[in-house]
Image (spheres, rainbow, N blue to C red):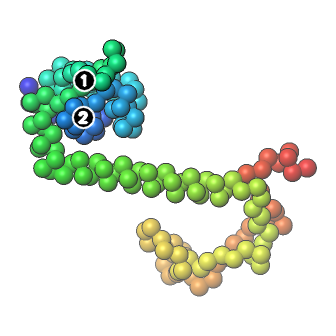
Amino acid sequence: MSDDVAKFLSKKGAIPLLWALAREDGRIVNEINEELDISGQTLSDRIEDARSLEIIEEDFHPADHGNANRYVLSARGLRIYVKCKDLGIFDAYEEFKEARRTYNDRRSKVIDWANQPIVEFRGPDSVERPHPSKIEWRDDPPSSTDGETSDTVEDEGDYGKTETWGVDTEEKK
């Protein structure tokens, strides 16, 4: 049975499901679905897997409406939960969720910026370009073909061209 539990824990959404059910009175499916970033089908599959392995069990809370499916951790599920907590998996999961929220927020900001009505680039004199040595690169900065970093930025672009972002070319006319 431990191979089956290990296989379950390796599946997408399994550990987050345990994290979401770490409440004294468990959670109903809609609450779990709101909490986790997995599809409804994946959630249904993980619930079914966890039930068949006796990791979770169905429960009823007096405040639940008639067709609510509430799940709680079983004794086996609690043992797995404690081990995950001891290993810091749930702390890492919460950090991951926060990092994902931060990423999505910052991604939205750059997309909003790129969707501004008109952004024009007309040439080297009208565009302030930072020198590559002034940029904080993720990896090593780019270098010239001879292996040394150049002190000048060379651009052989068409400086008469105007780029427009976020506006359909038909709308500009």
Say which residue appears at 75% left-offset and 62% top-offset.
119
Q: Report crowding for label 1: few under 14, some 14 to 19, many 20 or more residues within 10 A (C-alpha).
A: some
Q: Where residue 70 sits in the image (x, y, percent)?
A: 27, 24
Q: In which quarter of the view is residue 25 placed? A: top left
Observer able to see residue 96 = yes
Query: Is disc 2 placed on a helix, strand or loop?
Result: loop
Amino acid, disc 2: Leu
In the picture of the structure, the residue carrying the numbered disc 1 is: 61
The answer to which quarter of the image holds residue 110 is bottom right
Which amino acid lies under the numbered mark 1 shown in the image of this protein?
A: His
Residue 21: mark? 2
Q: Is residue 45 visible?
A: no
Residue at the location (15% across, 39% down)? 81
Near-viewer residue (27 or 123): 27
169 left or right, relative to 133: right
Between 73 and 11, which is closer to the camera in this rendering? 73
Instruction: Using a 10 Å C-alpha cutoff, classify the residue at mark 2 as few (fewer than 14 neighbours), some (14 to 19) or many (20 or more).
Output: many
Disc 2 and disc 1 in contact, CB within 8 angstroms: no
Q: Position of residue 61 (x, y in %)?
A: 24, 23
Image quarter for residue 21? Answer: top left
Residue at the top extreme, as displayed: 66
The residue positioned 37% from the left and 27% from the top of the image is 30
Above or below: residue 145 compared with residue 3:
below
Q: Is residue 25 above or below residue 92?
A: above
